[in-house]
Image (cartoon, rainbow, N blue to C red):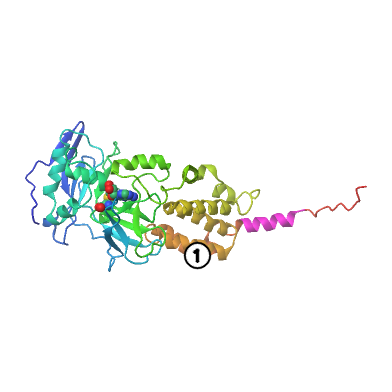
Amino acid sequence: MGGCDDSTTTSWAYGTQAFRIQNAPISDSGGSSATVTACAMLLDAPVIPFPRALLPPPQKSTPPAFYIANAGPSKGAGLFAACDIPAGDAILSDRPVAVVPSNVNAPWKREAFDALLPRISRISRDALLALANCKPLSEYPVVEGIALTNAIQVHLPVSSSAAPQEYGGVFPTVSRANHSCGLNTAVKWDLSSFSVTLYALRPVRAGEEIHIQYVDVFAPRAERRAQLARYGFECICPHCDLPDADAVARSDAARAELRDWRHLHPRFLPWSTDMCRADDDIIVSNLRALALVKQEGLYGMQVPFIEEIALSYAVLGDELRFREWAQQVVDLCAGQDPERASKFTGWMAEPQSYKEWGWRAKQRLLLDRQKPPVDVDISIPW
Ligand SMILES: C[S@@+](CC[C@H](N)C(=O)[O-])C[C@H]1O[C@@H](n2cnc3c(N)ncnc32)[C@H](O)[C@@H]1O
């Protein structure tokens, strides 16, 4: 592969840690393991050495469901939907060109980051160097600056539980996604194919920009903006660009309520067997959560609420509504959480197979039967 040179130093010590450079077992062009230079990684000792056998390629949709275009003067390039994309669909899969630790502050850092470049093929190097870099070259090695601007967290196999390093992968395509504090996609890392896949969290219209989140979107606007400063921009997405302080306070409160939802609102399991609670307690509570999710565009967290509404209807034995909500779980999870999707598919095929199917309806009937006749006082009170 053009320009690959591994004559440089490839291991460094840092306190009790030791780092090394290793190529990932993936290839640029489906070639043999001898040309595996598509991605170089700077790894510490607990990361289990990768097998030599090539990993299977990630799924690819043809034609692509996305394109890269200018997203505006202050945002640079961005990812856009090439067609209408249904909620739950995979938009694209992408493999990293570099994987680096998130927080190394050793004297050899520049040398190690620079040593990554000659270890990757020209194709991958060009893709890496074409990405945005919000860090000054005078202060940060180029690969580190690009990683700090673009990296997405990846999980690597480690041999011990000793303080695991965090790793970020730099991806030629997914790293083109700009940030928004309201989400339309989720990123899922899969070690077995050494790739990330971007899934639609809600229907995405053709031409709409595809966003991911760079920071904790449950944090208040001021905190999000402070965290985004390290990417060199102030967020002016529709969830940040609000008309006045009241609107900001409302948005901050909604996000905090969603973050703490499980501590603030009735829980499904105790409700399901507590006949003193209203039958629609959980449904009403989860519908409110979904309204807040929609208001704040936090679609990444909608599935557990939809799931609880479906299961509430199951416990109430309401088959029509159960199917309606269960279908939404299946549609949203088919790609990124197939296990959950298949559980709900099974219950939809045979609702009675859900262990608590209709439990509350049966209890309600029994309670109604046991009720003593109501004593009606017909005496006239004067
Ligand atoms: C991971 S890159 C995203 C792709 C990048 N726009 C490009 O041209 O390759 C991150 C950089 O994009 C820009 N960016 C991302 N989201 C933005 C937003 N919501 N508003 C303004 N700039 C943004 C910032 O310059 C940030 O440092």
Q: Is residue 26 magenta?
A: no
Q: Hey, what amino acid is under mark 1?
A: Met
Identify the residue shown where x is 19% and y is 57%: 54
Task: Out of 109 and 180, give the one closest to the viewer.
Answer: 180
Residue shown at the point (49%, 56%) measured from the top left: 306
Residue farthest right in this picture:
382
Image spot of residue 167 (x, y percent): 26, 44
Q: What crowding class fits label 1: few (fewer than 14 Cα within 10 Å), some (14-19), or many (20 or more)?
A: many
Kindly tell me whether residue 152 is visible in this rendering: no
Q: Work out which quarter of the rendered image holds the N terminus and state it.
A: bottom left
Kindly indicate the quadrant of the structure image that contains residue 361. bottom right
Task: Say which quarter of the image contains residue 139.
Answer: top left
361 to the left or right of 179 = right
Instruction: Check if residue 368 falls in the magenta segment.
Output: yes
Magenta residues, dominant SS class: helix
Residue situated in front as seen by the camera: 24 or 180: 180
Residue 188 seen in the current view:
yes
> Relative to residue 350, is residue 112 drawn left or right?
left
Q: Residue at x 49, y 61 (%)?
A: 326
Q: Nearer the viewer, residue 171 or 233?
A: 233
Direction left: furthest residue: 7
Q: Is mark 1 within 8 Å of ligand 1?
A: no
Residue 68, position as x, y percentages in the image:
26, 60
Report which residue position mark 1 lands on. Answer: 348
Magenta-colored span: 360-371
Asked which secondary structure carries label 1, the reply is: helix
